[in-house]
Image (cartoon, rainbow, N blue to C red):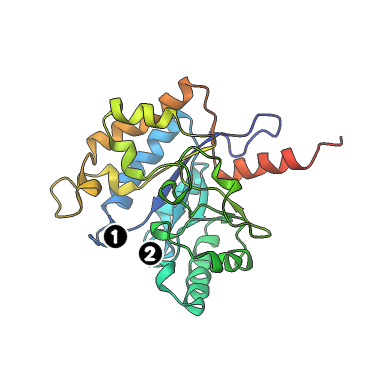
């Protein structure tokens, strides 16, 4: 699997992003997603020839450093998902700064980390400059449910912050686990770049857990099939997979003309 995008190739327009955290917080507190789901996903992406961006909590990296190193070794991008998975909207500024610092310290000891996604896609606009101060150049903390229109190019409508690109998620993670007859027409209508996101805990069987229906339905066998189905759906439609760093680099190439 290539370690970096070829500067002569078109920028990716389908981005698979993965939020690596405890199992279905705040309802569960186990780690089956990291110990069982994550290894399966890395192997599946290797087989499909797809690189993704993994937004990891600092506490996950503290608890399972070898698993997170495996993400980087496999050629994927490492991103930050906060430290404790607490909602940033429930924090004051000082706690938010500390949360970013703690997570960044742990993650950057494993690999470069310049992309960020807040837990539950909850990140107040007034905290966006804190990301730049913490060394982040891309934020993916907006979701489709918060956009003015699902199929609008959302990066044009979100609050601009100097030094920070914003790339919203295109769907909620549970969409990928829908039956293909419902899911595929939905996905096919999404504006590019398409930002898919999922969690490793969806790849283990949570169907018998006493949690919200949308969190447990279709987990493990359905979700594992869906990973390959969705990748092939976009590939058949000419989609080019890559990391959010690849996409940002492509945007930079479009803005700054090649003078050579």
* Frontmost residue, 61 versus 191: 191
Q: Which residue is drawn at 39% across and 67% down?
A: 84
Q: Is residue 239 left or right of residue 210?
A: right
Based on the displayed image, in which of its 4 quarters is residue 25 positioned? bottom left
Q: Residue at x 41, y 24 (%)?
A: 233
* Frontmost residue, 212 versus 229: 212
* x and y, in percent, of residue 22 in the image: 31, 58
In the displayed structure, 104 sits above or below 197; it is below
Q: Residues within 10 Å of mark 1 (few under 14, many from 20)?
A: some
Where is mark 1, residue-wise?
Answer: 25
Where is mark 2, residue-wise?
Answer: 85
Quick one: label 1 or label 2, which is nearer the N terminus? 1
Secondary element type, mark 1: loop
Contact between marks 1 and 2 (CB within 8 A): the answer is yes
Q: Can residue 229 be seen in this view?
A: no
* x and y, in percent, of residue 138 in the image: 59, 53
């Amino acid at each position: 699997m290539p370690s970096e995008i070829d500067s002569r190739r078109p920028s990716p327009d389908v981005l698979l992003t993965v939020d690596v955290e405890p199992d279905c917080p705040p309802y569960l507190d186990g780690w089956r997603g990291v110990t069982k789901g994550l290894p399966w996903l890395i192997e599946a992406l290797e087989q499909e020839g797809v690189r993704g961006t993994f937004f990891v909590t600092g506490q996950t990296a503290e608890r399972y450093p070898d698993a997170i190193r495996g993400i980087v070794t496999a050629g994927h991008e490492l991103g930050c998902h906060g430290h404790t998975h607490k909602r940033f909207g429930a924090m004051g500024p000082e706690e938010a700064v500390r949360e970013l610092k703690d997570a960044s310290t742990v993650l950057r000891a494993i690999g470069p980390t310049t992309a960020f996604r807040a837990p539950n896609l909850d990140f107040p606009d007034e905290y966006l400059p804190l990301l730049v101060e913490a060394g982040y150049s891309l934020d993916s903390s907006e979701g489709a449910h918060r956009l003015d229109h699902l199929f609008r190019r959302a990066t044009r409508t979100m609050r601009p912050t100097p030094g920070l690109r914003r790339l919203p998620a295109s769907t909620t993670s549970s969409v990928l686990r829908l039956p293909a007859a419902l899911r595929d027409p939905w996905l096919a209508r999404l504006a590019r770049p398409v930002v898919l996101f999922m969690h490793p805990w969806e790849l283990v069987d949570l169907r018998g857990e006493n949690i919200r229906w949308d969190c447990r339905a279709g987990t493990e066998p359905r979700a594992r099939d869906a990973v390959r189905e969705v990748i092939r759906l976009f590939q058949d439609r000419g989609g080019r997979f890559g990391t959010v760093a690849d996409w940002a680099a492509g945007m930079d190439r479009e803005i700054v003309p090649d003078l050579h």
